[in-house]
Image (spheres, rainbow, N blue to C red):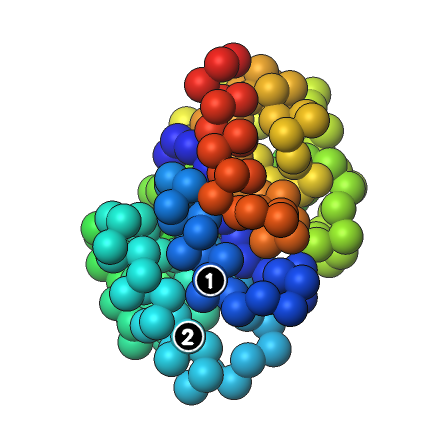
Amino acid sequence: MRGIYLVTDRSLCRGRALTEIVRQAAEGKVAYVQLREKELPARDFIDEAREIKKILELYHIPLIINDCVEVALACDAAGVHLGQSDMPYSEARKALGEKAIIGLSVETWLDVEKAEKLNVSYIAASPVFATPTKTDTKKPWGLAGLQKIKNFSRHPVVAIGGINENNISEVIGAGADCIAVVSAICSADDPAIAVHKLNDLIRSF
C-alpha cells in the first residue's frame, strides 16, 4: 500500500457530484478509492459503486467498498474495508476470495494485536488526529501511536484522520505506508490538484 487513498464522503463535496470528485481524484493519480456510504439503500449503493468502478477502471485504480461485503460482491470491487463492528475478517475473506483487498481499522492497541493473527491486506490507524469525519472512533493515535503501530505490525499501515498537506510529512515520518484522506480531497477546490500536492509531499519526504 503506497500513495494517497481517497475515502469518499458526499456531504463534504460542496454540492458537487461524487462521481466527478472521484474522476478528478483519479486524474490526480490517487492510488485507491474507498466508497463510503452510510445512508444509501443497498440498491443505490450498488448502482453508485458500479458507476464509480467504471471511472476507476480507466485509470487502473482499485475500488474498495466500506463495510458492505454484499455491495463489493455485487459490483466486483477490488475489496472491502472493515471496521471493528463489521463482518469478521474470516467471513469476508471467505466471501471475497484470497485475491481481494481487505483492510481493517484499528482503534485500540488490542485491535492492533488481534490484527497480527489475520492476513489482512492492511490495517488503518484510525484516527491519527481528531477529525469531524470520524466521530465514532476512540482516542486519536497521534504520531507516537502511529509509530508504535508501525514498529509492531507486520501489515502495511494506512493512516487516516485529520491528515492534510500541512501535516502529511509528519505522518509519513511516523511510518505510515499509505495516507487516507477525506475532506482534503472531497472539499478541495480542485481535487486533482489536491492529490498532486499530497503526492508531491510524499515523494519529497
Location of mark 1 (residue): 20
Tell me the residue at 38%/34% (across/down): 1
Residue type, label 1? Glu
Q: Quadrant of residue 58?
A: bottom left
Tell me the residue at 47%/29% (across/down): 199
Tell me the residue at 73%/36% (across/down): 129
Q: Looking at the picture, tell me which residue is in the foreground, 48 or 146.
A: 48
Q: Residues within 10 Å of mark 1 (few under 14, many from 20)?
A: some
| Residue 184: percent from left, percent from top | 63, 44
Res. 193 mark: none
| Figure check: 145 above or below 78 | above
Q: Secondary structure at mark 2?
A: helix
| Residue 85: percent from left, percent from top | 58, 62
Q: Earlier in the sequence, mark 1 or mark 2?
A: 1
Residue type, label 2? Glu
| Residue 93: percent from left, percent from top | 31, 58
Alpha carbon separation for disc pair 1 and 2: 12 Å
| Figure check: 95 above or below 182 | below
Location of mark 2 (residue): 48
- The answer to whether 111 appears left or right of 56 in the picture is right
| Residue 161: percent from left, percent from top | 66, 42
Count of picture labels: 2
